[in-house]
Structure formats: C-alpha cells, structure tokens
Amino acid sequence: MTGGAPVAVPGRIGTDRLSLNQATVKHLSLTEAVALCVRHDIPAIGLWRDRVAEAGLAAAAAAVRAAGLHVSSLCRGGFFTPADADGRRAAHADNLAAIVEAAELGADALVLVCGGLVPGRRDLGLARRMVADAIGDLVPEAVRLGVRLGVEALHPMFCADRCVISSLGEAVDLALRFPADAVGVVVDTYHVWWDARLAGEIARAGARIVSYQVCDWVLPLPQDTLLGRGHLGDGVIDFGPVTAAVAAAGYDGYVEVEIFNASVWDAPPDQTAATVRERFAAVFGGRLAIALRSRPAG
Amino acid sequence: MTGGAPVAVPGRIGTDRLSLNQATVKHLSLTEAVALCVRHDIPAIGLWRDRVAEAGLAAAAAAVRAAGLHVSSLCRGGFFTPADADGRRAAHADNLAAIVEAAELGADALVLVCGGLVPGRRDLGLARRMVADAIGDLVPEAVRLGVRLGVEALHPMFCADRCVISSLGEAVDLALRFPADAVGVVVDTYHVWWDARLAGEIARAGARIVSYQVCDWVLPLPQDTLLGRGHLGDGVIDFGPVTAAVAAAGYDGYVEVEIFNASVWDAPPDQTAATVRERFAAVFGGRLAIALRSRPAG
C-alpha cells in the first residue's frame, strides 16, 4: 500500500447510504427529525408510525419529499398473536393501515415485529402459525400497493413477549412462503449478530433482504433489554463480516442506524446525529478502526 | 379414558429421574445439599466445583456415595477464550482438574460453559475456533478417565460475555468433531427453548445428549439476566415438546432442575426442594396441567 492516498476498501459503504431511524432521536417530532437529517447531510430516514400519525400522513409524506429524503423503512407493523379473534381482526386492520402509510411515504419496507407467544399460551408453534397466517392475509394488499413487508427476526431474549421469529433463518423460511415482491426480511445486527449460521442465512435471504439496520451490542445489558443498544463501535459487534455478507447477497439499499438507548435519547439530537454519521463513516468507510470499548466481562 | 385409574402418559418421567442442581440451593454447602436431596427423596444431584472444593474432593465423593445419590453433572469447566497464552494455559489446567473431579465423583457429565468473545476482540469466529481447539486438547484426558464433556449452548444474550456457543445446533456441530464417548451436549431449556430448529437439533444430537437441565423462562427478565429463571410452571416454556424430543433422541438419564433466581435462593431450602419435586411431578408426570402464570406482556 502506498502513501497517503485513500485505500479502496472492498464493500465500503459511504454516508450516501446512511439512513437515520427516527427511534434513535426518539424525542423529536417527524418534522424535527427530518430537519435534523437535512442539517447533517443524512439522505434517508426510517420513520415510526406514531410520529407519522402525529404529523398527519399527507403532511409527513410532503415533509420528507420536500426535504429530499428517502424513506428507508416504516416501523412498524406486526403483533399478530392476540389471543382473541377481535384482537386479531384489529391487528389485521392496523397492518392494512400501515401498508397504506408505507405506500404513501414511499418506504422501502414496512418492518414487521411479529408478536410473542399468544397470551396465556405456551405453544410456540401456534404463535408461529398465526404469524404466517396473518402475513399471508396482508400479502394481497402489499402486492396491490407495491409495499414490501420486512419480517424482522428479533433477538431470542424477546421471543416470549415480542417476537417468536428468533433467528434470521426462521425469518427467511417464513418470507420464502410468499411472493418475493411482497415479503422480505430485515437484517438487524443487534438481533442476529450472535448467530453462527448468520452468513449462510444472509446468503439464502439474497434479494429478500429489504432492510439492513445497524447498532451495537453494549454490555452490560440494561434492566430494560430493549434499550441495550449503542452507537456503532461502542459495543462488541463485528460489523465487517455481517455487512460483507449483506452486500454479497445483493443488498444495495440504505443502511439504517437504529439505536434504542436511554442515554442516546437524552443526548442533544445534533450530537447524536453527528456521532451516527461519524461512526458510520468510520465503521463502513474503512477509514479508521474503532477500538473495542466494551470489554466483555470475564 | 376411564375412571380414576392413572393414565399412562407417553414419555412420562417420574421423580426417580429427578436431579437437583446444587445452584438451585446456592447458599447450601455440599453436605447440606446432599442431606436436602435425601430428605426429599431426590435421587441425584448436580454438583458445583466451588462447593466440591470447599468440602474437599474425596470427602465430597464419599458424602454423595454414602447418601446413595447419583451425580448427574459437575458444573463446570470451560471459559476457553482468554486473550493471552498464560490465561489459556491456566484454563486448560483448570479443565484438566475438573475432569479429574468429575471422574472421582462419578458425574455423568462435566458441563462446559465455553466462554465469550476474546477480551478486546470482536471476532466471533476466533472465539469459536479457540473453543474447539481447547476442547480438543481436553479429549485425551476425558477419554482416559471416562468423563463425558457436555458442551452447553447458552442463550444468545450471553454470547458476548459468557458463551459463544449460542444454539444447540452449534453445540452439536462442535461435539460431532470429537469422539462420542468424550464430548456431548447439554440441553438446557432456559437457553434453547426459543429455537425453531430445536426439535431437529435434539434429534441430530441423539446419543450425544449427556445432560438435560430444566428451568423456566420468567418475564420480566431481571437486571442480571443470569437470574431470570424460575420453577417449572412459573414461566412460559412448553416442556412437553422439548422433553419428548429429548426422550425420542434416546436420552434416559436424569433431568436436572437448575434455577438461578435470587428469590429462590432466599427461600428456605426445604421449601425450594419440595417445590422442585412437586413441579417436576406435575410437569413431567402429566398428572396435572400448570396454568400459565407469567402472561407475556402485549
């Protein structure tokens, strides 16, 4: 290697593919989050339905378009496992509404968090069949409106109460039952980094990957394990191999930084956005190595 | 079905196969735990090395033999991923000592908790290779002394800091590289219950299953996620299908109740032992159904 010229790193991803998931700046309204992205030259955003509803769907769509932002995802549909028929009907209606919103916003994917065990039941297979059936019921509307549903595998620690789809392989198995233009998978490093079969499952997912979300796994886990996420580089995840596998599978969409973390939420949003951008450039640009800060406890 | 006669339940497991893992009554010495098992007609015990050392190896072995108890496991060896050569040498020596102890105690298995990421490194593959190499280095001594090493897959939430073997399938892949009389796998419901591929992996494990440990997954998780375990029936795990798969794979050894839970530890040990026995009989005897107490949060 020679002198000071930039080294071309295979699989390098520039900040032109950075997306900020709105949950990372949880306290901001949609308009504020959009303005933040513009200020920090972040070209895409992942939106949340509650903030979209607060702004109004048409106004939200107009705001992101006026700002020139791409919508890399809408979070989220799912929660398909209510115990009673009324609950399931309500979930179906809510998911249909989410598909309409995703279409109006031009989102690359509607992220699905599928739901945990059926309340009062221990039967994992039942919950998983209900998830598959419920997704099947959404496919016609997704196809009609050109929206891709993204099945997100959540970390197994959320299997009981939040999502019975606990590994990427399982999400791929599920997605493959439906048309590729309607159902894909979300790869989120926080949820799947531990999986020895991850590279193979990413390859198998191939063009089914509709969203790539990133954040780091930081130890120790907080009391609320939903919030144990950190800025890229603050934890132990080795983003290189995962990202290389996602790229090799053909994914060339946005890479969305989504961090649920109470102290990140309490930080000034401009500081958060600057850190997101800087870490993204460092981790995916191959321009500098980030030392491991969280040393695993012995 | 007719009248009041007991119904033969396929795969029913009687309390003659119950083992109490000593960690469930953490505050008791080995002698006290042995006496507790005898008082409650529990025929086997899973021992911990610190308590064995405290009693003295020869005295501990004599105590369990005098009490007529079977030793279903010795916990634990492992932690194979120190960053430096000295640390790895120390781990090897400690594991050799554990094999000697397991042989002296007549334990069915020496449980291995393999260790997390190498401190200061994010490379999962490196950690996993180190685990495989370290186990290989132990195999000759295990064969010589007739001790079976049991690779335990830990829940993926412990991947970074405690065990990079995160699914039963991965543990089986690892065990299959070594002679069957030296290396097997531990199936622990707390760690693997969420896995959609579990039944298939248990079948693949077959005669490699050297220990079956049970406890329940109770929500919400406590701050220290190591301690989120409960008495059988207090959580959401569906023990029937897992146990049927383990039985179908040919496992006919003891079923060890191992509960890490601060409030269980604080309970009077006789109450804990009575509850362990009662729940075991209920869950594995098929004599009564246990209602789901922890309702998953919506």
Image (cartoon, coloured by chain):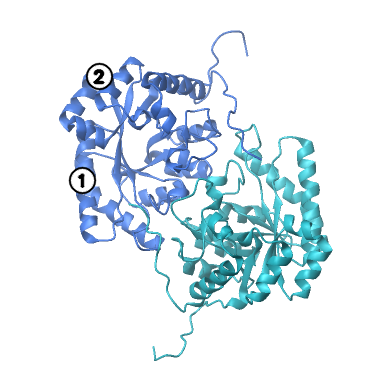
Chain colours: A cyan, B blue
Question: Residue B271 or B284: which is nearer the viewer?
Answer: B271
Q: Quadrant of the C terminus of chain B?
A: top right
| Chain of the residue that carries numbered disc 2 in the rendered image | B
Q: Where in the figure is residue B88, as x and y percent of width and height?
A: 24, 56
In the image, are marks 2 and 1 on the same chain? yes
Task: Name above or below for residue B211 compared with residue A201.
Answer: above
Q: On what subunit does the disc labeled 1 rest?
A: B
Callout 2 secondary element = loop
Q: Vertical placement of A3 versus B199: above or below?
A: below
Residue B15 placed where, x, y %? Answer: 41, 20
In the picture of the structure, the residue carrying the numbered disc 2 is B67
Figure check: A62 above or below B170: below
Q: Which residue lies under the disc numbered 1? A: B96
Q: Residue at x 51, y 77 (%)?
A: A285
Residue at the top extreme of this rendering: B4
Using residue B62 as the reference point, say whether residue A291 is left or right of it: right
Q: Residue A61's image quarter?
A: bottom right
> Label 1: few (<14), some or many (≥20) within 10 Å?
some
Q: The disc labelled 1 sits on which kind of residue?
A: Leu
- Circle 2: residue type: Ala
Instruction: Let me know if residue B205 appears in the view.
Output: yes
Task: Give the number of marks.
Answer: 2
Q: Which image quadrant: the N terminus of chain B? A: top right
Residue B286 as seen in the image, left or right of residue A138: left
Please tell me how crowded label 2 is: few (under 14), some (14-19), or many (20+) other residues with Cα within 10 Å. some
Residue depicted at 43% across the width and 49% down the height: B158
Q: Nearer the viewer, residue A263 or B48?
A: A263
How much space separates mark 2 and mark 1, taking CA atoms?
27 Å
The residue that appears at 49% across and 72% down in the rendered structure is A283
Q: Which mark is residue A91?
A: none
Is residue A176 at least partly visible in the picture?
no
